């Protein structure tokens, strides 16, 4: 919420709308500083979406903040019809995105369909910051993006990946590392540390790796992704999300339309996971470092054919 507080200090239009989610969003400081800019609707996410739409119509910039799945599933119709269809300036912040955030609250609070759902709705920008500081920057950036924006957040205990104040530029891929062009690794969110370790292992084996963060899943940076795919000729995508509808789908769609190359997807393979500790869950469900390395090696072989 640091980003939202910074915005509110400079812009009186900034509002926070919660659905009994103030503590989950760690937004008590915001309410203490700006009590007249906070709207609490209780456990009524559909009402929160409609309320946010009303605030936006009046020229305010509401941030509707709660669990990722309650935004994208419980209030999906309201977001589609009352926010996205009229292209209103509403920002959506969803926590516990992915399976890594379900340790405390279990499978009902692990949300791995959210990006896929919102990618199918027109006018919505989707941002997936990697860590807390990037989330702060994403919130600030979202306020300047016209129309609906969804910021997908983790559990609040995600590992720090970037140095503080590392640039966050919506709409553009971020090439983190380029050590050759045998394979491109595309990823975002909590899987970036695993991708970096996988890249180090592949490099030690003499495999050239280009590591790319895709924090803006929609609209995807088609020119940037296409350049990387053309340069490397093969890719692996990795995300804490169902492999259907998320980052992997977006990269594959871009490849199919611009430069078809072999691609492997790392993610939750269209199943319901159990709950547990984040690292153990990611390893168990095929999102481990070894899984990324093996996928990269196999995909390179497909390229050579």
Image (spheres, rainbow, N blue to C red):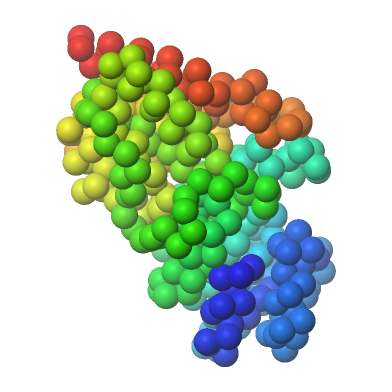
Q: Quadrant of residue 13?
A: bottom right
Q: Is residue 227 visible?
A: yes
Looking at the image, residue 227 lies above or below residue 289 = below
Residue found 63% across the figure and 80% down from its top: 15
Q: In which quarter of the image is residue 81?
A: bottom right
Depth order, front residue of 284/59: 284
Count of numbered badges drawn on the protein: 0
In percent of width and height, residue 66 lies at 69, 61
Q: Quadrant of the C terminus?
A: top left
Depth order, front residue of 101/163: 163
Looking at the image, residue 152 lies above or below residue 36 = above
In percent of width and height, residue 115 lies at 52, 47
Q: In which quarter of the image is the N terminus?
A: bottom right
Residue found 26% across the figure and 24% down from its top: 208
Depth order, front residue of 168/268: 168
In percent of width and height, residue 194 lies at 50, 31
Residue found 36% across the figure and 55% down from its top: 219
In percent of width and height, residue 4 lies at 59, 73
Looking at the image, residue 17 lies above or below residue 253 = below
In the image, 20: left or right of 115? right
Q: Quadrant of residue 248?
A: top left
Q: Is residue 260 visible?
A: no
Looking at the image, residue 68 lies above or below residue 269 = below
Residue found 32% across the figure and 39% down from its top: 177
């Amino acid at each position: 919420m640091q980003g939202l507080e910074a915005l509110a200090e400079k812009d009186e239009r900034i509002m926070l709308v919660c659905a009994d989610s103030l503590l989950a969003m760690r937004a008590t400081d915001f309410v203490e500083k700006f009590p007249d800019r906070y709207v609490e609707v209780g456990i009524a996410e559909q009402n929160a979406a409609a309320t946010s739409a009303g605030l936006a119509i009046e020229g305010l910039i509401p941030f509707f903040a709660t669990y990722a799945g309650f935004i994208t599933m419980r209030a999906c119709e309201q977001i589609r019809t009352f926010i996205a269809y009229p292209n209103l300036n509403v920002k959506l912040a969803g926590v516990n995105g992915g399976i890594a955030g379900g340790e405390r609250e279990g499978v009902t609070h692990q949300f791995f369909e959210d990006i896929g759902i919102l990618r199918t709705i027109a006018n919505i920008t989707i941002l997936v910051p990697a860590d807390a500081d990037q989330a702060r920057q994403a919130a600030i950036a979202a306020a300047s993006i016209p129309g609906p924006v969804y910021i997908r957040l983790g559990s609040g205990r995600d590992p720090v990946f970037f140095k503080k104040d590392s640039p966050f530029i919506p709409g553009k891929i971020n090439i983190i590392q380029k050590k050759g062009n045998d394979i491109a690794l595309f990823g975002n969110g909590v899987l970036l540390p695993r991708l970096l370790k996988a890249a180090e292992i592949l490099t030690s084996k003499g495999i050239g790796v280009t590591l790319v963060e895709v924090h803006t899943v929609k609209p995807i940076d088609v020119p940037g992704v296409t350049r990387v795919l053309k340069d490397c000729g093969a890719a692996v995508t990795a995300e804490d999300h169902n492999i259907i509808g998320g980052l992997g789908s977006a990269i594959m769609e871009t490849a199919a339309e611009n430069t078809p190359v072999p691609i492997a997807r790392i993610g939750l393979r269209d199943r319901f996971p159990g709950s547990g500790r984040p690292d153990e869950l990611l390893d168990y469900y095929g999102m481990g470092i070894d899984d990324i390395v093996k996928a990269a090696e196999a995909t390179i072989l497909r390229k050579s054919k």
